[in-house]
Amino acid sequence: MAGNSDPLSPRAKLAVTAGKAVAAASRAAGRGSGSVIGGRVALKLDPDLLARLAQNLDVILVSATNGKTTTTRLIAEALRAAGPVVSNALGANMPAGITSALAGSSDARYGVIEVDEKYLAGVARDTAPKCIALLNLSRDQLDRAAETRMLAENWREGLAGSKSVVVANCDDPLVVWAASSSPNVIWVAAGQMWKDDAWSCPSCGGVMQRPGDDWFCGECGFRRPTPSWALSGDHVLDPHGSAWPIHLQLPGRANKANAASSAAVAAVFGVPPQVALERMYQVQAVAGRYDVVQFQGRDLRLLLAKNPAGWLETFSLIDPPPTPVILSVNARGADGTDTSWLWDVDYTRLTGHPICVVGDRRLDLAVRLEVADQHFQVYENLDQAVAACPPGRIEVIANYTAFQDLRRRVGN
């Protein structure tokens, strides 16, 4: 069990103090939370600081293409039933941001940490996690990240022989292949709505067979493992076959899947499913996602979707037509500058919705919507788009930096 008896070295204390000072200066200058720049400064002064901060914690790492910020929040809420938690709740999920988060608490028992997919293996080496949750892998930021098979290979190599308990989604073949190198895996049937990155076998390259919810490779025998936890409608099935109701204020099937994986993680640390799922009900929004805000006398629901799989999940939870929808897409560094992924999104699912398009790359999106035979209007900014929307609550869907721009504009 984690404890706090080992004091940090003078060098580590200096690094933490300097990092906090730089972060505070960044916030004062209006440049965001300062967590990343603060962490970079701290790691420059003590390159081993992340490992030192993690040594007194029971660390849980959460990684995926989609859902990791929400799942991290749900796990953190569940584990607070067993002790104090420190977490990178705002989603700064690379080593610098993670270091800043862990430096912010001296009395935590658990460290629940979201990790960018590219950095999982390295962060796992530094933090010696007790548990790692792997949710899904799909195409994202093609100009920055490796293709999905390479990410899975990186995970597989990094987890080989790991002492961590790995909680993994058995419905995603890439996740299963990556997790299978670990000797201690708990399989969760969390589902996989987006399947377009998992039609070839990650083990041999053969064509995957997908009868119903099952999957297997007819060439090498690689197949879906038997889950011990499962999402079943509005319930989580535990390894004993008991069904526990999911209590969430967050919308959509994807968040029920996140809750199922979170309950399995919480159980590793002795938190019963009933307690874990009840505590998850406290989460109303995650870093602004799913918030309903007032703007220009209208209700706007803010939804984040960063890649084809995320957009598919988001389309499944918006209100039906004729609910107006505002779409905003940027292509800045944090988003990935390659917008070719727009062509992988099925925008015909928006048929019947009045659509308004904003964002830096609104013309790229307009071309895609034109090809999908959707009716839409392009506007310079959010104010114009909201003013043009017909009555009713507006669904606002944006990718990463576009979402942050919208939050600032509506004062959220």
Image (cartoon, rainbow, N blue to C red):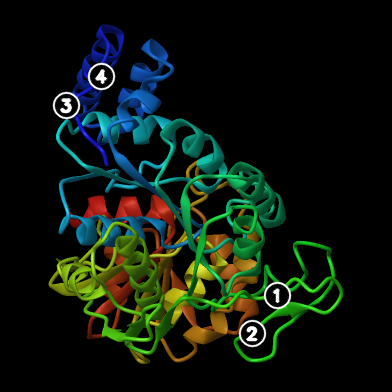
Q: Is residue 30 above or below residue 406?
A: above
Asked whether, in this view, residue 11 is left or right of residue 143, the answer is left
Q: Disc 2 marks which amino acid?
A: Asp
- Of pointers 2 and 3, the one earlier in the residue sequence: 3
| Residue 117 visible (yes or no) | yes
Labelled disc at residue 28: 3
Residue 113: quarter of image: top left
Q: Is residue 106 above or below residue 170?
A: above
Labelled disc at residue 223: 1
CB under 8 Å between callouts 2 and 1? yes
Q: Residue at x 30, y 62 (%)?
A: 266
- Where the C terminus falls, by quadrant? bottom left
What is the x, y in percent for residue 128? 44, 37
Neighbour tally class for label 4: few under 14, some 14-19, many 20 plus, Cα within 10 Å: many
Neighbour tally class for label 1: few under 14, some 14-19, many 20 plus, Cα within 10 Å: some
Q: Which mark's residue is nearer the viewer, 4 or 2? A: 2
Labelled disc at residue 16: 4
Helix, strand or loop at mark 2: loop
Residue 82: quarter of image: bottom left
Give me the C-alpha separation between circle 4 and circle 3: 18 Å
Q: Disc 1 marks which amino acid?
A: Arg
Q: Disc 3 marks which amino acid?
A: Ala
Helix, strand or loop at mark 3: helix
Q: Residue at x 33, y 55 (%)?
A: 72
Helix, strand or loop at mark 4: helix
Give the residue at mark 2. Answer: 214
- Of pointers 4 and 2, the one earlier in the residue sequence: 4
Q: Which mark's residue is nearer the viewer, 1 or 4? A: 1
Q: Residue at x 22, y 64 (%)?
A: 285
Q: Which mark's residue is nearer the viewer, 1 or 3? A: 1
